[in-house]
Image (spheres, rainbow, N blue to C red):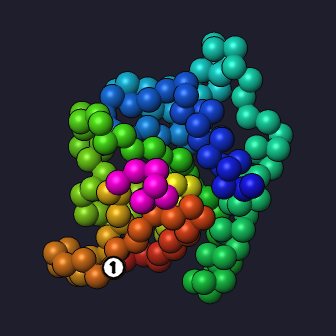
């Protein structure tokens, strides 16, 4: 039920936008929604479209999942008092649209703590199934020289990937 609720939140918000390149991003924390080659305010888009925004139940499910992921990260990494920082987002990647900017090329090797200075720990919760909902999209963790994959993660609904700072 939770995964269906999170998928519904993503679908409802993303229906109002869509990036020119492959990815569409919805950041509930900031209200940012990718639209063509920029970001728009998802709340303004809801108002302009006449579409009701998320329900109280939607927001409660989202908040509870975020709380549990934060608690799990704290226990996994032996820290306390973690807070969400931007960006905290839903993403959908459409392989049928070619990338328009380097940010649309999500397959490049990167380190979250270097790409997003506010990231100390990263958690990635999959809502889709990599063998049913799409093809490709494997997350790979590489060696220190960024050459050889050490681990590949196949997306599965409900799979949570957690990582600490460093070469990821």
User: In the drawing, does residue 164 fall left or right of residue 1?
Assistant: left
Under circle 1, the secondary element is: strand
Residue 36 picture quarter: top left
**According to the image, label 1 marks what residue?**
151
Q: Residue furthest toward the right? A: 56
Q: Is residue 153 left or right of residue 98?
A: right
Q: Residue at x 31, y 42 (%)?
A: 95
Viewer-nearest residue: 151 or 36: 151
Give the side of residue 22 with respect to residue 158, left or right.
left
Which residue is found at the position 72% from the left and 28% from the top?
53
- x and y percentages locating residue 93 in the rendered image: 39, 44
Question: Crowdedness of circle 1 by 10 Å Cα count: few (<14), some, many (20+)?
Answer: few
| Residue at the spot 64% in from the left edge and 63% down from the top edge | 83
- Which quadrant holds residue 142? bottom left
From this viewpoint, is residue 61 visible?
Answer: yes
The magenta region covers 129-135
Q: Position of residue 65 (x, y in %)?
A: 71, 60
Q: Is residue 163 magenta?
A: no
- Position of the C terminus, as image quadrant, is bottom left
User: As drawn, which residue projects farthest toward the front?
Assistant: 132
In this view, the residue in front, 18 or 158, is: 158
Screen quadrant of the N terminus:
bottom right
């Amino acid at each position: 039920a939770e995964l269906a609720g999170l998928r519904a939140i993503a679908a409802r918000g993303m229906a109002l936008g869509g990036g020119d390149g492959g990815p569409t991003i919805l950041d509930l924390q900031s209200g940012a929604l990718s639209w063509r080659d920029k970001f728009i305010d998802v709340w303004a888009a809801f108002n302009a479209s006449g579409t009701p925004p998320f329900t109280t139940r939607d927001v409660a499910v989202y908040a509870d999942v975020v709380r549990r992921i934060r608690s799990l990260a704290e226990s996994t990494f032996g820290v306390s008092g973690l807070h969400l920082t931007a960006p905290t987002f839903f993403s959908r990647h459409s392989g049928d649209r070619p990338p328009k900017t380097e940010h649309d090329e999500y397959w490049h090797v990167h380190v979250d703590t270097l790409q997003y200075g506010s990231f100390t720990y990263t958690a990635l919760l999959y809502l889709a199934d990599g063998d049913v909902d799409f093809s490709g999209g494997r997350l790979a963790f590489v060696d220190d020289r960024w050459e050889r994959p050490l681990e590949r993660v196949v997306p599965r609904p409900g799979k949570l990937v957690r990582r600490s700072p460093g070469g990821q």
